[in-house]
Amino acid sequence: MWRNRIARGLLIGVGLVNLAPGVGVLSSDRLEALYGVPVADADLELLLRHRAVLLAAVGAGLVAGAVTPTLRTPAVLVGGASMGSYVALAAAVGGTNEQLTRVAWVDVAALAALGVAAGLGRTRRPVSPVA
């Protein structure tokens, strides 16, 4: 019982981390504040606003997985792929600004929380006696 509650709490927390950048969809000013990158043209604005929508969708999926057990595994997989790919790309590219580096570290912490949630949320199967 307590394991499931902690797992659900962690999933909601990681979901909120992913929902937060969704405010970037509202304006280029918010995007610039979030990422410390000047949004110089409509092309970059479109890409970053679309990223905000996708991150919000991942966050909503994680929150939904916290309350609906059948959605938990897909939500954890998608959230892990999303955050893990950002961390890997940030490491491969290197030399990013302070805000983007902070995003990578937040994702590392969120990935750790996601891993703990996945481990705690697993249902234990009874061990059958060997005949």
Image (spheres, rainbow, N blue to C red):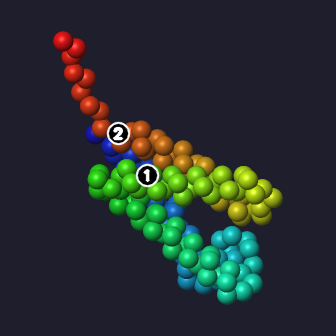
Is 90 above or below relative to 56? Answer: above
Q: Residue at the location (77% across, 64% down)?
A: 97
Residue at the far top: name it: 131
Q: Residue at the location (56% across, 76% down)?
A: 50
In this rendering, would 62 be left or right of 24?
left
List the residue tagged with mark 2. 122
Give the residue type at disc 1.
Val
Quarter where residue 98 is shown: bottom right
Quarter where residue 130 is shown: top left
Residue at the far bottom: name it: 42
- SS type, badge 1: helix
List the residue tagged with mark 1. 76
How many other residues sit within 10 Å of disc 1, few (<14), some (14-19) or many (≥20)? many
Give the residue type at disc 2.
Arg
Residue 76 screen position, x and y as percent: 43, 52
| Res 105 visible | no
Is 23 above or below relative to 109? Answer: below
